[in-house]
Image (cartoon, rainbow, N blue to C red):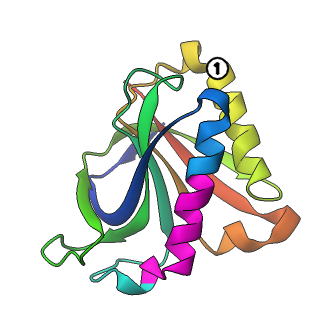
């Protein structure tokens, strides 16, 4: 169990669902936009270059609609570029998982494990997130941290 402090993020976002492979398509497009439009370069006041992929605004549980945002932690939301969104996350108690292996398959496999344990994890469905840093770019030795909000 890890306590995550509240944080601010500037991001791009899309609404999706895990139904019928829709999330894989929508999230692939969102990641493509993030990199092709150099969103990292547009974000002011960033704390680091760690990329956060956050799942929030859950309609119900992992089977319903939700919003995925991709962005960076920032010090301030006073200067938000056009076409980007600023948002604050409350933080709280989180369980940490580590996806290890070739990306994005390792992350997808770890989410499958999380969903399989959904009933026992006591998830709060407020905001779950993945953190992509230099360790996420190491081919078959990659690692991505996944944090699941619990109540």
Q: Which residue is mark 1?
A: 117
- Res 13 quadrant in image: bottom left
Q: Is residue 130 magenta?
A: no
In the image, residue 9 above or below residue 99: below
Position of 39 relative to 17 (above/below): below
* Residue 7: image location, x then y, percent: 28, 58
Is residue 134 visible to the viewer in this orientation of the structure? yes
* Residue 132 visible to the viewer: no
Q: Residue at x 24, y 76 (%)?
A: 82
- Dominant secondary structure of the residues highlighted in magenta in the image: helix
Q: Residues within 10 Å of mark 1 (few under 14, many from 20)?
A: few
Q: Residue furthest right?
A: 140
Q: Residue at x 36, y 24 (%)?
A: 151
Which segment is the magenta one? 27-40
- Image check: 11 left or right of 18? left
Q: Position of residue 87 (x, y in %)?
A: 24, 57
Q: Is residue 75 above or below residue 98?
A: below
> Where residue 50 sits: x, y (%)?
50, 71
Q: Residue at position x 38%, y 44% from top?
A: 3
**Left or right of 33 on screen, residue 60:** left
Judged from the image, the secondary structure of the residue bearing numbered disc 1 is loop
Q: Report the side of 52 relative to 58 (left or right).
A: right
Task: Name, please, the residue furthest toward the bottom.
Answer: 41
Task: Please tell me which residue lies in front, 75 or 70.
Answer: 70
Name the residue furthest top.
Answer: 119
């Amino acid at each position: 169990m890890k306590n995550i402090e509240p944080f601010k993020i500037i991001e791009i976002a899309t609404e999706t669902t895990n139904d019928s492979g829709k999330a894989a398509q929508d999230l692939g497009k969102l990641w493509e936009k993030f990199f092709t439009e150099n969103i990292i370069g547009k974000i002011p006041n960033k704390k680091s270059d760690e990329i956060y992929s956050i799942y929030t605004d859950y309609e119900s549980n992992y089977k319903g609609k939700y919003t995925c945002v991709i962005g960076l932690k920032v010090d301030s939301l006073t200067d938000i570029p056009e076409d980007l969104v600023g948002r604050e996350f409350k933080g709280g108690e989180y369980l940490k998982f580590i996806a290890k292996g070739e990306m994005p398959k390792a992350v997808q496999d770890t989410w499958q494990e999380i969903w399989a344990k959904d009933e026992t994890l006591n998830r709060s469905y407020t905001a779950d997130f993945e953190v992509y840093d230099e360790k996420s770019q190491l081919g078959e030795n990659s690692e991505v941290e996944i944090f699941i909000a619990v109540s």
